[in-house]
Image: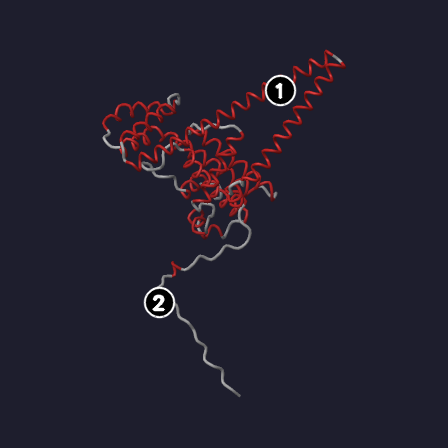
Amino acid sequence: MSKDKPILIEISDPEESPAEAPAVPELGESSALQSTARYMAKPTSRLAKWFWGSLLAFLGFGLSIAAWNFVTGLIEQNVVLGYVAAGLLGIFLIVLLIVALKEIAGFVRLGRIDSLQKEAAHAYAAADLTPAQDVVSRLERLYANRPETEWGQARLNDRKDEQLDADALLALAENEILAPLDDMARLEIEATARQVATVTAFVPIALADVFAALSLNLRMIRRIAEIYGGRAGFLGSWRLTKVVMAHLVATGAVAVGDDMIGSIAGGGVMSKISRRFGEGVINGALTARVGVAAMETCRPLPFVAKKRPGVTKLVQRALTGLFS
């Protein structure tokens, strides 16, 4: 009877730290918000744009011809009813024109915020006072009629001539003008995170909490944009949501690990509450991440002088007492 051969065991490098080991891949289905973020962040192909554009153009042309034939045919049959239909069609076209103008105005406002962000980034990178002064002037004009920033703009006017470098001037504008708007956006994030966590924890229907979380997140993104002066219509809000989701995916902020859950609720507490409460905490944390990404997307100036809100602190304040 032969003996077994010795087994060669390879020993890893003793200097390698356990912290440097690759992360264990997550199993199971991802969260609804994570899946939505990754789906919306995917760029639309040119073929898809042509397909939907040509389809909408064809449907619009067909509906226009059908409406025209209906009105003219009705006029030939009954003059009174025909002109009533023509008047209703005219009212509809006027309302449609107003909606289109509002959508265009929304895109213009979002474009103004985007250009201001790019100019601010250039001013920080170049450390040039002249571009920084232009950014501050545009920022003052953007919030000239906002009562929340009146006191800050007065302080900025008193002190901006004393600033001799770009970083100091932009930091002063960030602290004086954007501070109250940041507080409003932070409260909006906390309120939405609390609502999402509550709905997830207490609504027993499986798909109801998913739709509620998505709708609340979309509303939060729109309100944060309004806080920073980027009010948009339906199409503008959809574009803004895609930009926020792309930012989430690009920064790797669509996953919440056990370390965050432990910091929010504590390991001992999570073992005592139900699975729905745990999902509520996770969805609340994901909502806070979406809110912070919306702040970074809609804010005219980057977070330099002021610290970016932390997700853990936002969720802790939002969920204080909710699961106790």
Q: Position of residue 86 (x, y in %)?
A: 67, 16
Specify the farthest residue to the bottom.
1
Residue 85 appears left or right of 208: right
* Disc 2 residue type (three-letter): Pro
Quadrant of the image occupied by residue 56: top right
Q: Nearer the viewer, residue 94 or 14?
A: 94
Q: Nearer the viewer, residue 253 or 238?
A: 238
Is residue 185 in view?
yes
Residue at coordinates 30% horizontally, 32% vertically from top-left?
A: 170
Within 10 Å of disc 2 (Cα), the crowding (few <14, some 14-19, many 20+) is: few
Determine whether 322 is above or below 56 in the image.
below
Labelled pair 1, 2 in contact (Cβ < 8 Å): no
Residue at mark 1:
92
* Disc 1 residue type (three-letter): Phe
Q: Nearer the viewer, mark 1 or mark 2?
A: 1
Within 10 Å of disc 1 (Cα), the crowding (few <14, some 14-19, many 20+) is: few
Q: Nearer the viewer, residue 17 or 192?
A: 17
Specify the farthest residue to the right.
77
Quadrant of the image occupied by residue 172: top left
Q: Secondary structure at mark 1?
A: helix
Determine whether 65 is above or below 261 in the image.
above
Q: Nearer the viewer, residue 81 or 193?
A: 81
* Numbered label attached to residue 259: none
Task: Give the Cα separation between the discs numbered 1 and 2.
Answer: 75 Å
Is residue 197 in view?
no
Q: Secondary structure at mark 2?
A: loop
* Numbered label attached to residue 14: 2
> Closer to the N terminus: mark 1 or mark 2?
2
